[in-house]
Each structure stands twice: as C-alpha cells, then as structure tokens.
Image (cartoon, grey):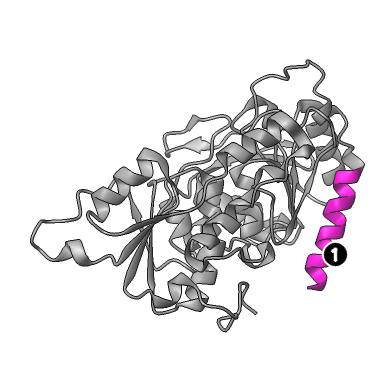
Amino acid sequence: MARGVKAAAPGAWPADAWTGTLLVVRLSSLGDVVLTTGPLRCLKQRRPQVRVELLTRPAYAPLLAAAPAIDRVRTTAEPAPLVPGSGEEARYARVLDWQGSGRGRRAAQRFAPGVARLGARRAALRRRLLVWLGPRIVPPASYVERLAESFAGRRLERRDLAPELVAPAAGRAAWSAAWPAELAGEPVQVLAPGASKPLKAIPRELRAALRSRLARRGPVVEIVSPRAGGSGTPAAGRSPAAGAELQLTRVGSAHWRVEGGLLAIAGLLERAAGFIGSDSGLLHMAYALGCPAVGLYGATAPELGFAPLGTAVSVGVRLPCRPCHVHGPRVCWLGHRRCWREIDPDRVMEELTALQQRTDGA
C-alpha cells in the first residue's frame, strides 16, 4: 500500500482549491531535497490533478526524476525558460518556495515571474534556542511537518511524510555491473561515515568497530568519498554528484569501498540489507529507497528537525552539551567528544537488527 495520508482525510486544506501546475523550489542540500518527496506524495494523493514540477540543482535531478510524487524535475542550469508574451509565463499556477531566503526567491522569479509564491514556516530561531538552552526548549516542528503545513494548513503526522525514492534504471545497472557476480546473493551492509562537517562524521574508532560487526553479516560496502561531477575528483564530506559512474575497491576479505555518482549509490542502497551512517544526506537517501537505516547523531540531534523517518531510527547519547551546533561544528568546543565516544557499537547493531526484523515483517 502506498505511503501517505488518505485522500479522504478530514478537514479542508488550502491545496483543495489548487489546480494546474505547481512549481516547487528546493535547490539544496541532498537530504533536504530528498525529504520533499514525502510531503509531495501526500499532496499528490490529496490532489492528483495538480502537476508537480520540482526545481533543484542539476546534481540532484537524475535521482529525483524517478520519484513517484514528481511529474517533472527542472534544474537551475536550464536557460531562461520564459519568453515575454509567449504565454509560457502563465504555465505555473503557483510556487511553493521551500528553499526560502534570497536563493529561493530569485529562482522562483526566474522560472515563474509574477506567480503567487508560498513558503514553509521556518524554525531557525527555535533551533538555535534548542542549541543554547537545551531541553528547556520545546523542539521545533520537523522539517517535513513544516513543508506539509504550507499546503495542508495544519500539521500532518510525521509517519505519513516519510520520503520515497526509486533507484533509476541506470543506477541499478551500474551497481549490478560493478558488484562481483559470486556475491550477488549476499546481504550487503552499507557504512557511510562521512558528513559535511568534521564533528558530524563517524570517528575512526567507532567506524572500525561498526565495520567489524557488520562484516559478520555479509560484505560491507563503505561509501568513503563521493565522486564529484564525473571528474573523478574526490569531494570528501560532500554529497555525490549526478551520474552512474562508480569505483569499487576491495580492501579486505569482507570490506569494500565505493565512490560514485548519486545514481550508482542509489542502486547500491536500494538493494542493501542494512545501512549505518552519519547525520547526512545519504542517510535520508537510504531509507527513502526502503533500506533499513540507523543514523548516528554526534554533535547534532534529531530534535533539530531532521530525524529519520520510515525504515530508519536514530542513535545518540544524552548530554547537557548536545546538540552543540545547528549544523555541526568543526571541533568539539569542550574537547571531550563524548557525543561520539559514548556511542556503544553493540547498541547500534541491536537497533539495526530490530529495524531489519520489523522491516522484514511489515
């Protein structure tokens, strides 16, 4: 059964009066773009006659092109699409600017000039207060709840807003061609320790402990350094760019390293038996593809609004200094890094096992 709210959910939504084509603006980053697919699925279930077009960066377009809730993906690399007087300026009925700030406004003006623009409620102040004052502050509404509120006029259930992706055929083919045929039936476990900030990345000691435990269950594929733009230049700590190119390297009896484009990574994640990763876009991408995923949160925390959904859980330790930064600092300001040192790898594996059992029984 498809995920999402029932089409006959009680109460009127502002979107109940919508018709025509909707332009949704979300340019970055990878996790934020992936998370739009859950709210958009709910909107399409409620208003299937509304055509949804997503405007994003070129790097994310191939991955989102197969998303069930999106009719068309447009990119900021396209030439100016509108010719004054051609009638094209009326092709969008409205714009959902989920990027916000000047970037979202400029993109909306370029692709849909003069069209009514709606935005999602922001939570920047409450997120900062949560960092400064800790549990004395009620956590903000999650990112997906705020997106859905922009068209539903109310907060929808988080469990109905889990993202949903389908690995494009090119990504599936690329992974199948690269993975050794003799291991085709083995349950692959994925470890994705990298992150955009040093203190969000899984540290070396914990990474090694998790790798050894995962290897008892089958081959471990570690996403080490996503490849940028097909050039082959590593971009450590950044999301992989578009494309089905990949490089698979065996570094141990049950340990492989992979770097590649988003399509190839999607082909891997869609068939993986389990995923352990940092607070990053790849975490959201993994469970959006249906992979049981455990997200490890060190300096950041799910309460900041980006907790994993669907076939995913989060693991972290309770500390008075956590979260210490909205996006994750470069260094531990107190010097102890307890948020990472006190994560028990055995507990992480127990969470993954329980999640896999629930997913298999669903």
Give the percent coordinates (x, y) of residue 237. 58, 31
Q: Quadrant of the N terminus?
A: bottom right
Q: Quadrant of the C terminus?
A: bottom right
Q: Which residues are magenta?
A: 347-362
The answer to which quarter of the image holds residue 191 is top right
Give the percent coordinates (x, y) of residue 333. 72, 17
**Which residue corresponds to mark 1?**
357
Asked if residue 284 is positioned above or below residue 185 in the image, the reply reads above
Q: Is residue 171 left or right of residue 334?
A: left
Is residue 333 located in the magenta-colored stretch of the structure? no
Along the viewing direction, whichever of 16 and 30 lies nearer the viewer: 16
Most extreme residue toward the bottom, as rendered? 8
Along the viewing direction, whichever of 77 and 123 lies nearer the viewer: 123
Instruction: Report the residue at 42% width, 38% height from top.
Output: 229
Q: Residues within 10 Å of mark 1 (few under 14, many from 20)?
A: few
Along the viewing direction, whichever of 244 and 74 lies nearer the viewer: 74
In this view of the protein, can residue 177 be seen by the observer?
no
In this view of the protein, can residue 317 be seen by the observer?
yes
Q: Secondary structure at mark 1?
A: helix
Q: Is residue 92 left or right of residue 333?
A: left
The answer to which quarter of the image holds residue 65 is bottom left
Is residue 353 located in the magenta-colored stretch of the structure? yes
Is the magenta region chiefly helix, strand or loop? helix
Instruction: Report the residue at 62% width, 28% height from top.
Output: 197
